[in-house]
Amino acid sequence: MFRNRLKALWDEGRPAVNGWLSIASPFVAEIMAGQGYDSLTIDLQHGALDYSGALPMLQAMRGSAVTPIVRVPWREPGIVMKALDAGAMAIICPMIDTAEEAAEFASFMRYPPRGTRSYGPTRAAVAHPGYGVSANDEVLAFAMIETKAGLENVEAIAATPGIDGLYVGPSDLALGTTDGRLAPGFDPEDPDLVASIKRIAAVAKANGIRAGLHCGSPDYAARAVGWGFDLTTVSGDTRLLALAAAASVAEWRQLTGAAAEGAGA
């Protein structure tokens, strides 16, 4: 039987490093998949792509040992099931505010009698030999905790059968829980927000499920592992491309003394 590599990694007591894909490009997905990530998430919520863009990206990732994850746009059964049928081994669902919403999302992830997923794993059966109803035990459902309501109900959400992990979106969590005091962003240092993030990890642990956090830097991600997070996202394709390009251009300008057009005018 096939096995979710993330679950195998966690069974060995090791944390996972996750990458993020927002560009609709199989080539970008293939490049990222070859860099040593344990998992890669295709972002259908905020990424510049849709399902037709995600499918060839999943295909491009198959040549690597990376575990494919999809963040869906919303808690809607069609896209959750379609992403699973395309071969995603984990789904991240945004804006989960209550245990009832968590249960609804969890039901989309599993075949009856454990859920309401419709059977038809067209590509999944090819990408994961042996795929069938046994996928119920291997796919992972991550509920995003990123609102005031989600944080208030985090214990009930974590205790919901079928939820395998909590995933923290720090930008929306900052917007939703600090009354506008904090701007959205990665790697927050605000004590209250950090306390909320740590609380989510602790609640996940108390309920025997996993915790994931979206980070911007390896340093912050490593700290988060120390807080109890099992999966930390370290940046993504758009940010990495922009940072590398900016650093390369800045170094060239420094070495040549050639100012950018319009500078100093």
Image (spheres, rainbow, N blue to C red):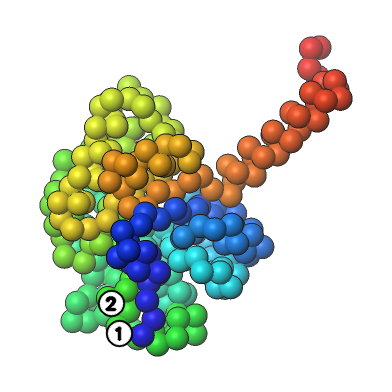
CB within 8 Å, label 1 to label 2 = yes
Q: Label 1: few (<14), some or many (≥20) within 10 Å?
A: few
Give percent across and percent down for residue 164.
25, 62
Q: Quadrant of the N terminus?
A: bottom left
- Above or below residue 224? Residue 263 is above
CA distance for labels 1 and 2:
6 Å
Residue at 31% over, 48% down: 229
Residue at 27% over, 76% down: 137
Q: Nearer the viewer, residue 216 or 77?
A: 216
Inspect this view and state whether residue 48 appears: no
Q: Which mark is residue 225?
A: none
Question: Which residue is the extreme one toward the front?
Answer: 12
Q: Which mark is residue 136?
A: 2
Residue 7 found in image quarter: bottom left
Q: Nearer the viewer, residue 113 or 164?
A: 164
Q: Nearer the viewer, residue 4 or 74?
A: 4
Callout 1 amino acid: Val
The residue at which mark 1 appears reads as 133
Secondary structure under tag 1 reads helix
Residue at 86% over, 25% down: 256
Inspect this view and state whether residue 236 appears: yes
- Above or below residue 52? Residue 194 is above
Q: Quadrant of the C terminus?
A: top right
Give percent across and percent down for residue 14.
35, 57
What is the number of callouts on the image?
2
Secondary structure under tag 2 reads helix
Q: Label 2: few (<14), some or many (≥20) within 10 Å?
A: some
Position of 12 compared to 63: left or right?
left
Give percent across and percent down for residue 9.
37, 64
- Above or below residue 132? Residue 181 is above
Position of 237 compared to 168: left or right?
right
Q: Nearer the viewer, residue 152 or 140?
A: 140
